[in-house]
Amino acid sequence: MLTVLKYTNLAVALLLELCMIAALGYWGFTTGNGIILKVMLGLGAPVLAIILWGMFGAPRSKWRLQGLAYGAFKFIIFGVAIAALFAAQQEQLAIAFIIVLVINNILLYIWHQ
């Protein structure tokens, strides 16, 4: 049973990463004046997050950060996504995201995932 919970927690971690990208895209498309700026932010912010996550956060990255640096990186990149949700006036979604993110990270730490 515990194995199922551990795999579920890893799946939730992946979903949180996808939600982080979606939050940045949502913010971008709802921010700024004019369609060009909205499209640039709506596509640019998620692409930048994907590049940064792929370089420094992905498990198989050759430049993956370790220890405190990895924790700080995750805090910053997910914090920016949460701030983007608040800026896009999606407070309830941001709070739900925070709750799931905190629980997921506690379990990742406890289970050494």
Image: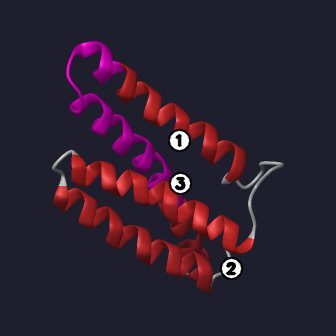
Residue 71 placed where, x, y %? Answer: 61, 70
The structure residue drawn at horizontal position 37% and vertical position 69%, both measured from the top left corner, is 100
- Which kind of residue does numbered mark 1 sit on? Ala
Q: Residue lying farthest top?
A: 36
Q: Quadrant of residue 42 in the image?
A: top left
Amino acid type indicated by mark 2: His
Q: Quadrant of residue 51?
A: top right
Q: Is residue 44 above or below residue 11?
A: above
- The residue wearing badge 2 is 112
> Could you say where residue 17 lies in the image, as x and y percent from the top left?
50, 51
Residue 73: % across, % down: 60, 60
Label 1 crowd bin: few (<14), some (14–19), many (20+), radius 10 Å: many
- Label 3 crowding class (10 Å Cα cut-off): few <14, some 14-19, many 20+? few
Q: Is residue 74 above or below residue 58?
A: below
Of callouts 1 and 2, the N-terminal one:
1
Quadrant of the drawing holding the N terminus: bottom right
Considering depth in this image, is 82 or 34 the residue closer to the camera? 34
Please report whichever mark, 2 or 3, sits nearer to the chain's N-terminal start: 3
Mark 2, secondary structure of its residue: loop
Residue 107 is tagged as none
- Element under disc 1: helix
Q: Residue at x 56, y 72 (%)?
A: 4
The span picked out in magenta is 13-39
Q: Amino acid at mark 3?
A: Leu
- Distance from disc 2 to disc 3, alpha carbons, whole Å, reads 16 Å
Residue at image coords 42%, 60%? 79
Residue that mark 3 sits on: 14
Please name the residue that numbered disc 1 is placed on.
49
Q: Main secondary structure of the magenta part?
A: helix
Q: Name the side, left or right, on which 7 lies relative to 78.
A: right
Task: Decide if residue 7 is on the left or right side of residue 45.
Answer: right
Q: Are marks 3 and 1 in contact (CB under 8 Å)?
A: no
